[in-house]
Image: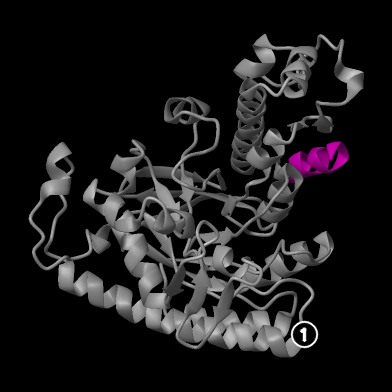
Amino acid sequence: MAITFEITARDATTRARAGRLYTPHGVVETPVFMPVGTAGTVKGMRQEELEQLGIQLLLANTYHLYLRPGHEAIREHGGLHRFMSWPHPILTDSGGFQVMSLKGLGRVTEDGVCFRSHLDGSSHFLSPERAVEIQLALGGDIIMTLDECVEYPASHETLSRAVKLTSRWARRTKKFYEDQRTRDSGFEVRDSVESSSVPNPENRILNPVSASLFGIVQGGVDKELRRESVEEIVELDFEGYAIGGLSVGEPKAEMYDVAEYTAELLPEDRPRYLMGVGTPADLAECVARGIDMFDCVMPTRNARNACVFTSEGKLVIKNARYARDESPLDPACECSVCRRYSRSYIRHLFVAGEMLAAILATHHNLHFYLDTMRRIRQAVHFGNFADFCSRVRAGS
């Protein structure tokens, strides 16, 4: 396996666990939150700042990078790590969720997904094999299978069809991935400035051995279908497992319930990734249910819309009530933004349309999320995670 996963601590009263995920570009302490770097960048943040915040693992989006600048251009640069100057672990999604969320622009078939670019309307096709091919060219540490994600609410028939299609795609994905790994197992990509000029006459995909493939479980909020999906996906023996198809409109209580039910069915010795979740309270609640990995656009997207997360709950900083408020965004926060800038000043930046407003809010929100995850890991190790969860619930 290109990655290894070890559990270092367990909570005695919940299903929470802490661990280490060893990847080709570094060790990731879990539970972990991945900021979303959609197009190879976390909007408004330099890579140096991301490092200073202690970000361990970034998510990059296959759909957007495939369309612009193109996976071949990134491969020629030596992969996404070198292209975006990020020497730490990267997870790439399959692009399927973005394609399927393009209202009226995508069509699912047995072979894959036909779609038109949201940029210029050009036609494209994404198959399970093509999704892996693109991700291997990008060179992430963790890559994902193509799946069909269904919005809530959906009929049993629709969910069942998506589960079966996701399983068939997973089998094709795993076979293609193994074929590439066998074919190119002796081809080593040099980690140097000259890596983009390595002779590659057969146009081989650059080093699939360094990428670990995760399978995705579907089934909506239907537990019977979730079990069916788990059994079919786990049978293929992926290096990690993601729970997809949640946080798509279902009530929060159902999301927690299904996440816990599904996580309990997944192998103990593999990382469990809950896709697209969520608020700081969601992170704590789902760690308590056995989840190890998370991603969500919420801290960065909310920041650009003047919404910040604090120890006292969400705060919409553009509100007039903060016009003369000299306190920091969160008096309990130790990030560099809260140490230096006032609510009044940051509100002024938003009202004036200054780009610094989103930059400062993004920095704070990412710090808040990462600090939440650090405290979660610490609580699991010290045996007081249940108390931590109670405090989070009280403040949310």
Q: Report the side of 240 relative to 198 (left or right).
A: right
**Residue 371 x %, y %:** 62, 32
Q: Report the side of 255 relative to 131 (left or right).
A: right
The amino acid type found where label 1 is placed reads Ser
Q: Report the side of 14 relative to 183 (left or right).
A: right
Tell me if residue 44 is in the magenta stretch: no
**Numbered-mark total:** 1
Which residue has dot 1 on it?
A: 155
**From which residue to which does the magenta span run?**
386-396
**Residue 80 x %, y %:** 34, 47
> In which quarter of the view is residue 3 placed?
bottom left
Most extreme residue toward the right, as rendered?
A: 321
Could you tell me if residue 359 is visible in this image?
Answer: yes
Could you tell me if residue 2 is visible in this image?
Answer: no
Q: Is residue 205 or residue 225 the one in the foreground?
A: 205
Tell me if residue 392 is in the magenta stretch: yes
Q: Residues within 10 Å of mark 1 (few under 14, many from 20)?
A: few
| Residue 31 in the image: above or below residue 350 | below
| Residue 42 in the image: above or below residue 359 | below
Q: Which SS type dominates the magenta stretch? A: helix
Q: How is the image coloured?
A: one colour
At 78% from the left and 30% from the top, the residue drawn is 311
Q: Is residue 3 or residue 67 the one in the foreground?
A: 67
At 69% from the left and 12% from the top, the residue drawn is 341
